[in-house]
Image (cartoon, rainbow, N blue to C red):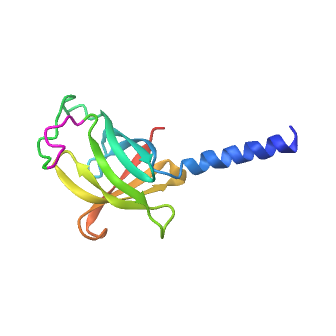
Amino acid sequence: MNKQSIALALVAFAAAAGAQETPVGLWKTIDDGTRKEKSLVRISESSGVLTGKVEKILDPEAKPDAVCEKCSDDRKNQPIVGLTIIRNVKKNGDDAALWDGGDILDPNNGKVYRVRMKPVDGGRRLEVRGYIGAPLLGRTQVWQRVE
């Protein structure tokens, strides 16, 4: 290979590695209490704003046609599969690896929490912290990247 080919390969590798440092992608949610796999959530970005939708329910005890009965906003009685549970999350200007400013819905209880997300372990895992008021008053789940 010539020097130009090597340089192009290195640039492509760096861009691919950097892309993994973002919450964008498909994630397996893991319950922080039971450590069981719950669902697959696809996080996408549009104009610098992240949203996340449930693609699949993994919990064998959950109904595949379940709806968000306990939701109190426009998501009430909407099917869980296809439901937008993450809204309005943006990159934090102070911390390049941190995404926040939006909210996350827990479809099990219908509650909406503020959210912070941070890719860790080279982007293979995502720390998702839902909280009320200050980030100290919340809980963190660690999701695993699927793609």
- Left/right placement of residue 116 relative to residue 81 reads right
- Left/right placement of residue 11 relative to residue 71 reads right
**Looking at the image, is 52 positioned above or below residue 61?**
below
Farthest-out residue, right: 2
Considering depth in this image, is 125 or 5 the residue closer to the camera?
Answer: 5
Q: x and y percent of residue 137 in the render? A: 25, 68
Q: Give the range drawn in magenta.
A: 73-80
Q: x and y percent of residue 97 in the render? A: 49, 61
Image mark count: 0
Farthest-out residue, front: 47
Farthest-out residue, top: 64
Q: Identify which residue is drawn at 16% across, 36% down.
A: 67
**Looking at the image, is 98 positioned above or below residue 109?**
below
Considering depth in this image, is 71 or 66 the residue closer to the camera?
Answer: 71
- Left/right placement of residue 146 relative to residue 41 reads right
**Looking at the image, is 85 positioned above or below residue 89?**
above
Q: x and y percent of residue 109 in the render? A: 15, 49
Considering depth in this image, is 79 or 126 the residue closer to the camera?
Answer: 79
Q: x and y percent of residue 90 in the render? A: 41, 58
Q: Identify which residue is drawn at 40% across, 50% down.
A: 50
- Quadrant of residue 16 in the image? top right
Q: Identify which residue is drawn at 20% across, 45% down.
A: 107
The N terminus: image quadrant: top right
- Left/right placement of residue 146 relative to residue 53 reads right
- Quadrant of residue 40 in the image? top left
Q: Is residue 76 magenta?
A: yes
Q: Is the magenta stretch mostly helix, strand or loop?
A: loop
Q: Does the magenta stretch include residue 116?
A: no
